[in-house]
Image (cartoon, helix red, strand yellow):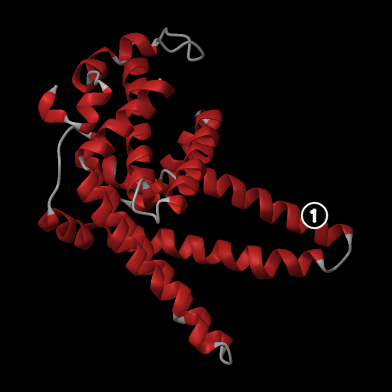
Amino acid sequence: MIGFLIKKTFFDLWDNLFRAALINLGFIASVAIPVFIPSLFVSFPVIGLVFLCIGIIWCFIYLAAAALSLKAVSDYGSFGFTDFFRNLKIAWPAGVVMGLFVFIAYLLVTMVIPFYMAMNSMIGLLLSAIIFWTLVVGILSLQFFLPIRSRLDSKIPKAIKKSFLIFFDNPLFCIFSFVHNLVLLAVSVLLAFLFPGPAGILLYLDEALRLRLLKYDWLEVNPETDRRKIPWEVILIEEQEKTGTRSFKNFIFPWKD
């Protein structure tokens, strides 16, 4: 399943390279708000934090719209500019929630945990450890929040609940997805975030969720199946036929294959 997931994500990203690059460019422009504006208020740290919060929230509103748009790519379709701007109006509440979570996580990592660690006591160490591991579980779970919001449910509390349910039912898969996206992030740095960039990460997460949901559809129809031995080769037959295979020449010169 993992091999097919990576292959399908790459195929879909390659087929929509121009759209992905445009999404990434828009995100690069958005990041300028939380990165550069707070630095103008070094003498007024509270104002700087306010602009940092606003900038992070806007970035995740943008990513929420991108996730909703890229869902069409995962479903073997496409999207246009009008779709993206329409999705901004739909997805902004999820973006606000995710942005607030990231801002709070930033405060916990940069201020709260260092404060407790500076106490040099068992209580401070215990509180730091609790906050740290809570953040780890939250990050591993909520990495799927935007795809879940886009694909499953428009109600934010349900999307949050389902994010944690997916993590606790598939912890190794969620850890792999997080590490995979860290690798994509590192590659993106080398390519100035134009490829694969945030669009590639969001597309992978949506593809991962979409294929993972097929497991639950299978278990609903075949409740006697051993959950530790999911027959992915059977479940993914239709998906593999739709995705197909490609030669190297087809990637570079698709009109010649």
Q: Secondary structure at mark 1?
A: helix
Q: Is residue 57 above or below residue 192?
A: below
For the C terminus, the quadrant is top left
The residue labelled by disc 1 is 126
Image position, residue 57 (x, y; %): 39, 67
Q: Is residue 48 above or below residue 30?
A: below
Q: Is residue 125 above or below residue 50?
A: above
**Residue closer to the observer: 41 or 253:** 253
Image position, residue 193 (x, y; %): 39, 54
Q: Tell me the crowding category of disc 1: few under 14, some 14 to 19, or many 20 or more residues within 10 angstroms, Cα based.
A: few
Image position, residue 155 (x, y; %): 31, 51
**Residue at figure coordinates x 50%, y 30% from the top left:** 173
Mark 1 is on which residue type?
Leu
Q: Is residue 202 above or below residue 167?
A: below
**Residue closer to the observer: 131 or 18:** 18
For the N terminus, the quadrant is top left
**Residue at figure coordinates x 51%, y 44% from the top left:** 182
Residue 5: which quarter of the image?
top left
Q: Looking at the image, can residue 212 be seen?
A: no
**Residue at figure coordinates x 27%, y 41% from the top left:** 151
Residue 113: which quarter of the image?
bottom right
- Tell whether 64 sits left or right of 18: right
**Residue closer to the observer: 254 or 139:** 254
